[in-house]
Image (tube, rainbow, N blue to C red):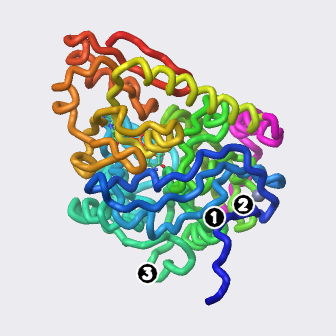
Amino acid sequence: MGKELDPVRHFCRACNGRLHVFLDLGNQPPSNALLRRPDDRENFYPLQAAVCEDCFLMQVNYDVSPLELFGDYVYFSSGSKEWLDHTRRYCEQMVAHCGINTESQIIEIGSNDGHLLGHFKAKGVERVLGVDPSYSVAQVAIAKGIDTMVAHFGTPALAGVPLADLVICNNVMAHVPNLNDFISALSRILKPRGTLTIEFPHVVNLLNFTQFDTIYHEHYSYLSLKALEPALGRYGLFVYDVEFLPTHGGSLRVFVQKNPGGGDRPDVRAARHMERYLGDMTTYRDFANRAAKIRQDFSAFLLTHTVYGYGAAAKGNTFLNYCGVSRRIPCVGDVTPAKQGKYLPGSHIPVCDDAALLAQKPPYVLILPWNWRNEIVARLGPELRKGGGHFVVAIPELEVWKA
Ligand code: JHZ
Ligand code: ZN
């Protein structure tokens, strides 16, 4: 038998620079791999965060195959009302300011259940195409009449993809192991005067607010302008503007063209300024120390309180598995039908709907997706309050308050 390839990366997926590991979250199952039965077999893989010493792209150093991660996806992006509003506003902005009209060709990569393209269709833009590798979410889009290609986007999958006036990459670039091939494919489908927008949780916020739970195998990279600009530049793509967004703990939306012309806009300079510590290794060491402190504080709290969970988010699984929490949390509530009745990977905590959670009169509810804190407090607060319950968040630090 031939020698197996070492799946641990020592060099950067973007520029081939050397990687430095700064946080070890242990061996973990893929974060969205919910189990049908608590005794189902699951795969565990090393979960370590590393940073490139040349381009400072933060990334995981162990690549789980995208085929394993995205085949039967349980994340439906239309699960939150705030997110639906966010995508509606994006659509309006592109129509009002970026020249998108009913003749435009729009392509969304990672189109999930198609709700963003649905906003454009509602405005009379007929030529929309979604690309998503997951059949489970794509079929929802197709059922809504959104033309969708089930494929892992990249240069081998360009046959039949038209040239586009607008290419949208929302929360998708982090999910791509081969970043260079992906960017090369983006460049090939963008018309010479077309616009590409890329939205991603900004690594500056991940580091500043100790959002270590957003590190999981599905997220191969943790993006910044600093790492992205040279990667885009290799394929003739240039950033001409950015926008700061509150979503997913603080995101950047980057506007890209082939020949933007003009100087840098003020927000581009502001983003670069925010990123000035990304080249300093103490940033990463301090972050890892704060993650360990969060684990310590939450574990101590769990020993003396009865805690239920809410929101079976991917990030919640990184958190629970890093803390080594198992059946001590009786159940986790979630509105997603595809998650209800299943068990969280690693911890095997059952997922139930809101009513089943509230029926147990939970004294403490840990909000795992802290990014939806306001929406979740509004949803559960009135009922929780009746039983004298409390909310808990663990990130960026342990916080407990009466509902
Ligand atoms: P949420 C996702 O991460 C998925 P996750 C993905 N990997 C990605 O890249 C990032 O976002 C950016 C539920 N919920 O959105 C729905 C309620 O039950 O933080 C979800 O299961 N009731 C593509 O998985 C979960 O919580 C509610 O009222 O960490 C939220 O997951 C609300 C608001 C949410 O994403
Ligand atoms: Zn690099």
- State yes or no: discs 3 and 2 in contact (Cβ < 8 Å): no
Identified at 51% across, 22% down, the residue is 300
Label 3: state its secondary structure: loop
Does the segment drawn in magenta span residue 352? no
Q: Residue at x 62, y 68 (%)?
A: 178
Q: Report the front residue among 177 and 110.
A: 177
Residue under numbered circle 3:
160
The residue carrying mark 1 is 179
Q: Can residue 96 be seen in this view?
A: no
Labels 3 and 2: the sequence-earlier one: 3
Give residue 250's mark: none
Write down the region rendered in magenta: 258-282
Q: Ligand 1 quadrant?
A: top left
In three-dimensional space, the C-alpha distance between marks 1 and 2, rounded to whole angstroms, equals 8 Å
**CA–CA distance between discs 3 and 2?**
26 Å
The tag earlier along the polypeptide, 1 or 2, is 1
Dot 1: what SS?
helix
Residue at horizontal 37%, vertical 71%? 150
